[in-house]
Image (tube, rainbow, N blue to C red):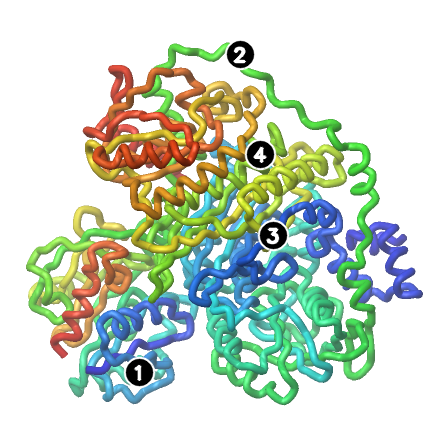
Amino acid sequence: MTKFELALGLSQREYEAICAGLHREPNELELGLFALNWSEHCSYKSSKRFLKLLPTTGKRVLQGPGENAGVIELENGWCVAFKVESHNHPSAVEPFHGAATGVGGIIRDILSMGARPIALLDSLRFGEFSDPKARRLCVGVVSGISHYGNCVGVPTVGGDIYCDDAYADNCLVNVMCVGLLKKSELKRAIAQGVGNKILLVGALTGRDGIHGATFASEDLVGETEAKRPNVQVGDPFTAKLLIEATREACQLPELIGLQDLGAGGLSTAPAEMAARGGVGIAIDIEEIPLRDPTMTPYEILLSESQERMVLCVRAGSEQKFLQIYRKWGLAVAVIGEVIAERVYRVRHEGRTIAEVPISLLVGGAPEPDFVRIAHRTARGGTMRPAAEAHSALHGDRSWCEALKRLLHSPTIGSKRWVWEQYDHMVQINTVIGPGAHDAAVLRVKGERFALAVTLGGNGRYCALDPYEGGLRAVCEAVHNLLSVGAEPLGITDCLNFANPTVPEVLWAFEQVIRGMADAARAFELPFVSGNVSFYNQSETRKIHPTPIVGMVGLLRDIECRVPMGFQREGDQIYLLGKLSGKVGGSEYLKVFYDAWGDALEPTDLELERKLFQTMLTLAQQRLLHSAHDVSDGGLLVAIAEKSFVRGLGAHLELDDLSEGNLFGEWPTRFIVTVAPEREDALTELLQSGGVPYRRLGTVAGDALEIAGERILVEELRQAYETALDL
Amino acid sequence: MRAAVVVFPGSNCDYDTYYVLKDLLGVETDLLWYRETALHRYDLIVLPGGFSYGDYLRAGAIARFAPVVQALPEYIARGHGIVLGICNGFQILTEAGLLPGALTKNISQRFICKTVKLRVENNATPLTQLFRYEEIIELPIAHGEGRYIAPPETLERLKRNRQILLTYHGENPNGSVENIAAIMNEKGTVFGMMPHPERNSEQLFGTGAGLKIFRGLVHLV
């Protein structure tokens, strides 16, 4: 095996599999095609076996995994398309453009389903902000998202940010896009009908991003600067034109299928479309509109220039499509056709310069040896031990001071500095936007129902216990939707992990998936789309196993949405769900002891299910004045967040002032408020639903008060609002 | 009454504005492609927010050469109707010289999207007639280049003619001189505002103050 082949990221075994499949040696161009199609990023060769563990079916599922995005049915013929995807490696090297093109890529995925993109959410992970590199990456990533998302006219409505040393060398940038479509508008990324035409639309093809997908399938080591040319440059203006033009194109019945050109560019997208349609595709390389006419066929095929899509259209209708894209000032060309032989054929001035069977190119990558070996040996094996259990907690710290300091930590504190740089209102659907609640709520014009969306995940939990961490990631997303009064409908996930050839990484990967799968089954929720990002590690550091879960829910009546904050003095405050727990894994332990503490307490899925049903009933009956799930930071942080909304304080009647009770992050609970006259109705419903509860106190005044100690809401808010000032 | 919302390549508040005029107020409204020049059919022409031409070079700097903008001076001179520029539309109008002054990068150098408080400085105009004088209203802003500047003699003239319509109240989010958020030309036929009235035109999104702005414009014409 030559150096050249190794540099493409193919293994000796893979090279042999290619030769065996072709019955000959591949030429350089063909090898390039395989390198991209068989990269981890495009083929999921190391993760496929495990992803099959996730439930993917349900009565509302219109499109499950395998397309550019999943699609779920809502009401009145409306559907929602959604997917989350990572752009970690590019963002670590070139934060601005890396993050910007991450936004662009996921928007085109949604567009490919025939949907109009209506919302974006971002989950970002950085090192601690005491490290200037982490701050620089955050500033770059946020301005990249702001630059692209704002210009393209899709509101950024939610997401989260965590800071942890584990992400110091590999920041994570996961972007979720949500699109709305009518059932009749659904499109697939498919090529069909021999003789039908293949169109390339959008931007010109240039030299940027060559081998981006193989770059994303390696550890980030050494001179990352040298990888800068692997990062694509985004143009949100062209993307905006592409959205409008493609929405027009989708109205034409002659459109058979369309696909975004993402990782791998023209080396992967047409082949995938042909694979889905059970056909072949031939493209004529000289027809491709180029930014630089001196590009070689190899460069043209492997280019990852952004803002491009491939369309398959009925023969004879090409002119209609050309007109639309020309009207919007975009490049457009007929670059090939559907053929009966199931091969991907690349022609140059009539001469075939590459030809490989579709079945070998798409899905033909053999499962790497390490997956099979690790799968046999690593189960229950060398899991990283949890940090030392913390036995001697100081009980003498004032809860006021502790709360203030927690609220000021970047992971807990207000992310206003970030989301005020994002246009979160364009399209005028954002009823509940970023920073205002556990989930964002978007109205659908002319309809009674609304959509709720959320994205997040806690890597520290997964580092402590990957199974429980994966399970909690799904439960947390469910809670976020229930808080606003919405019924969860479907899941998308982005699994961010270190190098999978390390057995403990692969073991954690499987555990996280098993946890997510068990939680999803308990709630009967399908995974409809997702993405895997491996190799998030440097020479010295691995990221935490970090599943980011995106979820979409249906709020049947927008008038039944439940606010997060305290609404009225005199309202009664209740804790619902699991009423006590420990402090292990909490932000509190991290901030005050630099420790992780005991193992996580296992989530009781039976209680989760009861809480699920009860919260939905409470919202439908409009019994609650407010609801908020208790997560990062624990009970007092959740109460403080409720107090910030209207500056209303609370008298809390807590008998247990232990660190575990005040700052523990044990799962399965909500804090709600109810008008005094509806208290009986609330408790009756909780009892009949089998949900434990405890009264915590009363909404009152402008301070939080516990056991004679008090602190002004305004003082806490100051700490909270100044946590993130980059 | 017939209104047009201009669609430039890169406009992204065009549908939002169209929705408010057409669906909320029931005004006969067209989305007008930027190549159109037959404007005399319209009583109100809105240049919506967004990033026309990607804001490349400078916000509004390329859009001012679009055929529809080139046709505006005659439309205004002949008194066919009113022109309103919102956000990017305001930037285009100043670039085209149809409103005085310029809109430059926010003093923070960052894009900013939030709801702000504004004070009504002149309520004797179509844009502001449904508010009380010095009323405090709330509207969202969303811009990277919204810092209004103008030479002292222009500011003097704006004040003398009562062309300043809305000013930021409490906090000045972008560093605009004299807290200026919205102005009009001398004749009161061309209006420019950085805040987005279409984003607060329903109770669902706040007080609905934005709808009063459209209602005022539509009412008079």
Q: Earlier in the sequence, mark 3 or mark 2?
A: 2
- Could you tell me which chain the residue with mark 3 belongs to? A
Q: Is residue A310 visible?
A: yes
**Please, what secondary structure does the residue beneath circle 2 have?**
loop
Q: Which mark is residue B70?
A: 1
Q: Which mark is residue A391?
A: 2
Q: Are marks 3 and 2 on the same chain?
A: yes
Q: Are marks 4 and 2 on the same chain?
A: yes
- Could you tell me which chain the residue with mark 4 belongs to? A
**Please, what secondary structure does the residue beneath circle 1 have?**
helix
Q: Are marks 4 and 3 in contact (CB under 8 Å)?
A: no
Q: Write the residue at 43% across / 54% down.
A: A554
Read off the residue under disc 4.
A469
A524 w.r.t. B32: above or below: above
Q: In front: B2, or A307?
A: B2
Q: Is residue A140 visible?
A: no
**Where in the figure is residue A388, as x and y percent of width and height?**
60, 17
Q: Are marks 1 and 3 in contact (CB under 8 Å)?
A: no
Q: In front: A708, or B55?
A: A708
**Where in the figure is residue A577, as x and y percent of width and height?**
43, 31
Tell me: A282 left or right of A317: right
**Please, what secondary structure does the residue beneath circle 3 have?**
strand
Q: CA distance from mark 2 to mark 1?
A: 75 Å
Q: Amino acid at mark 4?
A: Gly
Q: Earlier in the sequence, mark 4 or mark 3?
A: 4
Q: Are marks 4 and 1 in contact (CB under 8 Å)?
A: no
Q: In front: B104, or A688?
A: A688
